[in-house]
Image (spheres, rainbow, N blue to C red):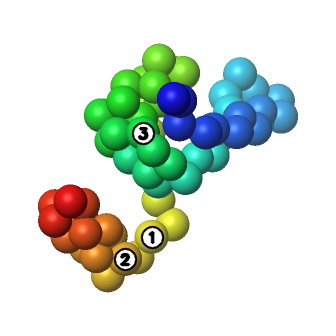
């Protein structure tokens, strides 16, 4: 299974934004999700999670 992504071209450039749920969710492992993003040419990941949400997500994943 592939991790869902949506690509939005940046007008006037060859760049694009790739939107995705947090890598490692949606029935795909974190390593597979990151590998897929790299194959798509993604070089930077930006998150909208705050520190508390990120720490909670990391803790939850470590308990699985």
Q: What residue is pinned by disc 2?
A: 53
Q: Are marks 2 and 1 in contact (CB under 8 Å)?
A: yes
CA distance separating discs 3 and 1? 19 Å
Point out the tag, 3 or 1, that comes first from the N-terminus: 3
Badge 1 crowding class, 10 Å Cα cut-off, few under 14, some 14 to 19, many 20 or more, is: few
Residue 64 position by quadrant = bottom left
Q: Are marks 3 and 2 in contact (CB under 8 Å)?
A: no
Where is residue 34? Give x, y as percent: 38, 33
Give the vertical position of 6 relative to 26 (above or below). Answer: above
Q: Are marks 3 and 1 in contact (CB under 8 Å)?
A: no
| Element carrying mark 1 | loop
CA distance separating discs 2 and 1? 6 Å
Where is residue 35? Give x, y as percent: 37, 25
Badge 3 crowding class, 10 Å Cα cut-off, few under 14, some 14 to 19, many 20 or more, is: some
Task: Residue at 38%, 46% (x, y): give it.
Answer: 24
CA distance separating discs 3 and 2? 20 Å
Q: Which mark is residue 49?
A: 1
Q: Nearer the viewer, mark 3 or mark 1?
A: 3
Where is residue 18? Give x, y as percent: 62, 39
Q: What residue is pinned by disc 3?
A: 28
Can you see residue 47? yes
């Amino acid at each position: 299974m592939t991790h869902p992504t949506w690509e939005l071209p940046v007008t006037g450039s060859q760049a694009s934004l790739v939107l995705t749920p947090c890598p490692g969710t949606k029935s795909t492992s974190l390593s597979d999700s990151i590998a897929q993003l790299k194959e798509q040419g993604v070089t930077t990941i930006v998150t909208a999670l705050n520190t508390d949400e990120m720490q909670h997500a990391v803790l939850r994943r470590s308990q699985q």
